[in-house]
């Protein structure tokens, strides 16, 4: 089982991305199971929010909040605070949306300019699908085709095509990332 | 309209009352208009209609809270009769009668 | 079809597949999504129903009862304060034997205010005459929607049915759900037929009063019907598995209990976590097991006894406390064992109140406590030892 | 529904509310009886906890010949909503759903559900039989108890004046929802009541009729005086017969000259303690109300 922890701000779409992740993962095999849930509570734009995924090739019974994750994904660099390590399992990786080269304080932290890609394709600094695509490309946990087909089925038509384009380009960047 | 439908509909007094376990319904749902007791014993005075005075205006019928005054044809004239099983003797009929054709008499 | 859905969405599909004729509900977190989803289905035509926007929970259930009295299949949903607000109507539906189905998103009750999941709302209302089932996951939620009508409307039962779903951890968590076809659903669930309704050929008086001479008979029947529901639940699950291929285990689910020395008894979603811990401990050679109570009413007394009779000790873990005593589920479980002459060490863990997370470590600790016999009778998870009075 | 206005001769001989255990001379039971005779055999009646359900539904003595049900006290309108919806869902559209709730059941505990039903414009006819206090539980004050009335919760002792609040203007509260049809009536003015029920029956959407129903026990009058005292309430100008339709108010009857308020008051034991000064106050309040009515209501 892999555990994934998302950090974002209300309105940035962390939970949407976690749902896409779960749906894409489970579409890959009949055996695959996934859960996706947000940090529960009234939604307020701008407030720090978290979302969670567990993915496995068996039923998942554990719905508790993920304290330490295999992957921690930050949609907003400002949420990456000093105690990030406490949320990471050993061998875990962090993916952070940032334009800032200096964010590489730690080799476990992988930077990607997701907002930049969002800006380029959507004209808005939207980072959720870009981080999702990049993470999938980098880790190989989910195939690009699965992500695209889930996006086709679940995203509103207004933003569907451009987000699929983001997924493709971000996936490619993740895949080619120099380790 | 079938004969059944033409018949006047009215709750009626039954001979037996459901009391054994298999007569009691499973849910709180039962035949409407199922009466097991009369109201005659409530009465201390009773309305008596004087058919000579009655002009069949039906005011008494209209204003009876218990609905126990009925239209009746008497020698081709419209009159009323009272169901003493259910009349409580309130006296409204006597009061609304314009011809003073209903008097309240003490129950013997 | 395998679909990635939240518990609320899955349940809404179950209601759609049940061809519910009247939906009346009032919004409350975390129930809202099920009602929003049904409203969407109503708008897009996939659910042909009368959708009533009532002005309170009391009216939601009162309206459902009225519709049921016409012979229509009805649904309402609520949570927490809303469930408490409709308490009067809960008795009414049960006493009138109207097989209304309600989804209750389990949520803490004020005060203090809290919107998160615990089970104090429904467990505090066990005596209102409703069948109470507690779902494990989104799939079971959907399946319970279909089964609830089948069971509630059975002429031997005629009893309202409350499907309880843990607030947020189930209602708002997305997971894989197999959504059956309408054709399958229709094969399993016939349309509603009842004599407990108005009738224009033979007019009826409903919801009447009954004096002391006969009142107890109606109450006895209510009780008897609830007991009869046990068999009907079994039958319904058997037919369910024939049509849908998914098997359920009746009033409770046993997981690796046959040779278990130490058992956790619980209900709702947290059982999923307990299962995982059971597997881990089993791998380490420790004989532990899980009993998941699926129905709290009717209560699985014999089944509890059978499941625990070979255990050395057990704990009941529940998101509920009856102040001044212990968790209500614990009381019920102990009472069942007493009735069957079983006396083994047992402990009560009250956790998850107001949505507090129940973690993997919490479950390990509970197994540890009962194994070592070091637990106190009633333990509040998260409360330190020095906070207790003695 | 017959197009002609019904009268004593043309009303059905069916009796739907019969053999009930209401007190002799009960105004409420008269309203229920006549309303059902106008609405006919397909009517489904809903009665909350209150006098009419208490006297009509004691298994096995069940006094309604038509389909009838008791609702929760607060749930008259919401249960009616459900019944209407249940039949709609089954494609049945010819069932008049009628509610009979008292003043407390309507203006107090039931007003939320009533307001909700009017808001949704549910196809129901709600009849409030107003006997001006919680009579079923032994004469306690409701928000429709008039000023000065003695009840068991507004007792007259130690110089008390009884109830010190004015009667809620239920008719206009209901009208303010923009309801398709609302009316006031009394059991003393039967042709007017019948006409209004008949009219309401022919209108789609939510309809409301507020009927003054004297209670011999609670008002302290002879059982035979129910009808007369209801008429006097109208003649003295204390009860207004009116309708509301298409956003406008219409006066059904305007007394040429008001009868003496004092006569009306003094006939009722619930007002026995009122002084001439109190009665003057009630008279002034009546005059003020009629000033308003004359300005706002169509004649």
Image (spheres, grey):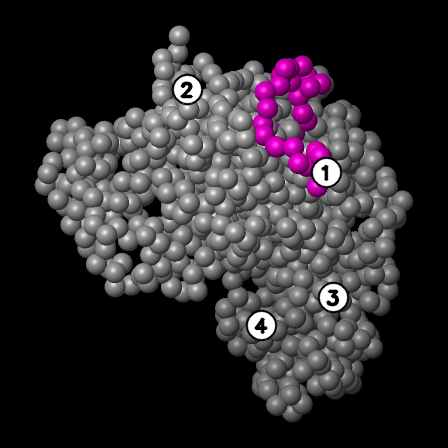
Residues marked 4 and 3 touching at CB (< 8 Å): no
Mark 1 lies on residue: B2
Mark 4 or 3 closer to N-term?
4
Residue visible at 39% across and 34% down in the picture: D27
Q: In this rendering, is residue D215 above or below A138?
A: above
* Label 1 Cα neighbours within 10 Å, binned few <14 / some 14-19 / many ≥20: few
Residues marked 3 and 1 touching at CB (< 8 Å): no
Q: Is residue C125 left or right of residue C343?
A: left
Mark 4 lies on residue: A8
Q: Which mark is residue A22?
A: 3
Q: CA distance from mark 3 to mark 1?
A: 66 Å
Q: Secondary structure at mark 3?
A: helix
In depth, the one of A168 and D154 nearer the eye is D154
Q: Secondary structure at mark 2?
A: strand
Q: Nearer the viewer, mark 2 or mark 1?
A: 2
Q: Secondary structure at mark 4?
A: strand
Coordinates of residue C168 in the picture (x, y in percent): 61, 55
């Amino acid at each position: 089982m892999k555990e994934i922890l998302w950090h974002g701000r209300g309105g940035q779409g962390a939970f949407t991305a976690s749902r896409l992740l779960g749906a894409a993962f489970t579409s890959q095999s009949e055996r695959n199971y996934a859960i996706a849930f947000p940090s529960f509570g009234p939604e307020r734009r701008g407030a720090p929010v978290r979302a969670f995924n567990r993915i496995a090739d068996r039923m998942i019974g554990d719905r508790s909040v993920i304290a330490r994750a295999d992957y921690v994904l930050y949609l907003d660099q400002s949420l990456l605070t000093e105690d990030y390590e406490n949320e990471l399992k050993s061998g875990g990786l962090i993916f952070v949306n940032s334009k800032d080269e200096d964010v590489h304080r730690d080799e476990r932290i992988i930077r990607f300019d997701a907002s930049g890609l969002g800006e380029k394709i959507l004209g808005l600094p939207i980072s959720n699908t870009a981080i999702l695509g990049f993470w999938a490309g980098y880790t190989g946990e989910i195939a690009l085709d699965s992500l695209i087909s889930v996006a086709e089925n679940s995203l509103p038509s207004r933003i569907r095509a451009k987000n699929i384009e983001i997924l493709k380009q971000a996936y490619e960047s993740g895949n080619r990332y120099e380790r | 309209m079938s004969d059944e439908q033409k018949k006047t509909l009215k709750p009626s007094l039954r001979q037996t009352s459901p009391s054994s376990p298999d007569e009691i319904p499973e849910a709180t749902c039962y035949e409407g208009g199922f009466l097991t007791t009369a109201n005659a014993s409530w009465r201390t005075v009773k309305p008596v209609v004087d058919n000579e005075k009655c002009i069949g205006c039906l005011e008494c019928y209209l204003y009876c809270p218990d609905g126990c005054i009925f239209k009746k044809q008497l020698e081709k004239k419209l009159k009323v009769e009272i169901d003493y099983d259910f009349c409580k003797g309130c006296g409204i009929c006597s009061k609304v009668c314009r011809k003073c054709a209903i008097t309240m008499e003490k129950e013997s | 079809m395998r679909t990635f859905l939240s518990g609320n969405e899955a349940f809404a599909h179950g209601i759609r597949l049940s061809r519910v004729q009247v939906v009346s509900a009032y919004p409350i977190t975390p129930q809202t999504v099920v009602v929003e989803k049904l409203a969407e289905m109503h708008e897009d035509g996939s659910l042909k129903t009368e959708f009533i926007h009532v002005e309170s929970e009391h009216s939601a259930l009162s309206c459902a009862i009225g519709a049921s009295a016409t012979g229509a299949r009805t649904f309402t949903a609520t949570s927490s304060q809303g469930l408490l607000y409709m308490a009067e109507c809960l008795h009414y539906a049960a006493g009138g034997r109207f097989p209304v189905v309600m989804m209750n998103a389990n949520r803490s009750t004020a005060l203090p205010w809290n919107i998160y999941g615990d089970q104090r709302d429904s467990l505090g209302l066990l005596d209102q005459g409703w069948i109470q089932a507690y779902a494990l996951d989104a799939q079971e939620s959907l399946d319970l929607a279909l089964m609830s009508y089948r069971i509630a409307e059975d002429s031997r039962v005629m009893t309202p049915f409350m499907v309880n779903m843990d607030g947020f951890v189930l209602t708002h968590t997305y997971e894989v759900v197999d959504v059956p076809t309408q054709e399958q659903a229709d094969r399993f669930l016939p349309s509603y037929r009842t004599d407990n309704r108005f009738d224009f050929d033979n007019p009826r008086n409903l919801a009447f009063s009954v004096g002391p001479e006969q009142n107890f008979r109606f109450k006895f029947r209510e009780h008897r019907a609830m007991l009869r529901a046990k068999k009907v639940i079994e039958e319904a699950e058997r037919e369910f598995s024939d049509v849908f291929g998914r098997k359920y285990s009746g009033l409770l689910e046993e997981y690796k209990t046959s040779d278990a020395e130490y058992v956790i008894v619980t209900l709702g979603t947290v059982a999923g976590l307990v299962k995982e811990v059971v597997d881990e401990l089993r791998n380490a050679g420790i004989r532990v097991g899980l009993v998941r109570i699926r129905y709290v009413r009717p209560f699985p007394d014999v089944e509890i006894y059978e499941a625990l009779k070979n255990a050395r000790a057990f704990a009941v873990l529940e998101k509920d406390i009856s102040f001044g005593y212990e968790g209500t589920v614990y009381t019920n479980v102990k009472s069942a064992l007493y009735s069957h002459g079983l006396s083994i060490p047992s402990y009560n863990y009250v956790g998850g109140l107001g949505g507090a997370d129940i973690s993997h470590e919490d479950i390990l600790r509970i197994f540890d406590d009962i194994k070592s016999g070091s637990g106190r009778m009633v333990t509040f998870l998260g409360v330190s030892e020095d906070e207790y009075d003695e | 529904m017959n197009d002609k206005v019904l009268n004593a001769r043309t009303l059905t001989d069916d009796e739907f509310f019969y053999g009930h255990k209401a007190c002799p001379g009960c105004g409420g039971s008269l309203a229920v009886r006549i309303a059902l005779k106008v609405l006919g055999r397909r009517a489904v009646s809903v009665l909350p906890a209150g006098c009419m359900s208490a006297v009509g539904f004691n298994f096995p003595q069940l006094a309604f010949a038509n389909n009838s049900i008791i609702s929760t006290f607060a749930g008259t309108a919401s249960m009616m909503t459900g019944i209407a919806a249940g039949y709609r869902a089954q494609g049945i559209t010819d069932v008049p759903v009628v509610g009979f709730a008292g003043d407390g059941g309507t203006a107090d505990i039931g007003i939320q559900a009533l307001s909700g039903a009017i808001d949704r414009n549910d196809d129901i006819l709600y009849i409030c039989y107003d006997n001006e206090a919680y009579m079923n539980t032994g004469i306690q004050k409701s928000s429709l108890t008039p000023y000065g009335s003695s009840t068991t919760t507004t007792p007259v002792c130690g110089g008390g004046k009884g109830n010190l609040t004015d009667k809620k203007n239920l008719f206009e509260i209901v009208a303010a929802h923009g309801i398709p049809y609302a009316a006031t009536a009394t059991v003393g003015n039967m042709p007017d009541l019948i006409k209004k029920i008949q009219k309401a029956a022919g209108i789609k959407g939510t309809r409301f009729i507020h009927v003054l129903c004297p209670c011999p026990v609670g008002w302290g009058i002879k059982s035979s005086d129910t009808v007369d005292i209801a008429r006097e309430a109208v003649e003295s100008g204390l009860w207004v017969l009116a309708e509301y339709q298409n956003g406008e108010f219409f006066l059904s009857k305007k007394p040429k000259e008001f009868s003496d308020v004092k006569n009306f008051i003094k006939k009722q034991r619930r007002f026995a303690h009122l002084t001439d000064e109190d009665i003057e106050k009630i008279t002034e309040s009546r005059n003020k109300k009629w000033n308003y009515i004359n300005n706002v209501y169509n004649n």
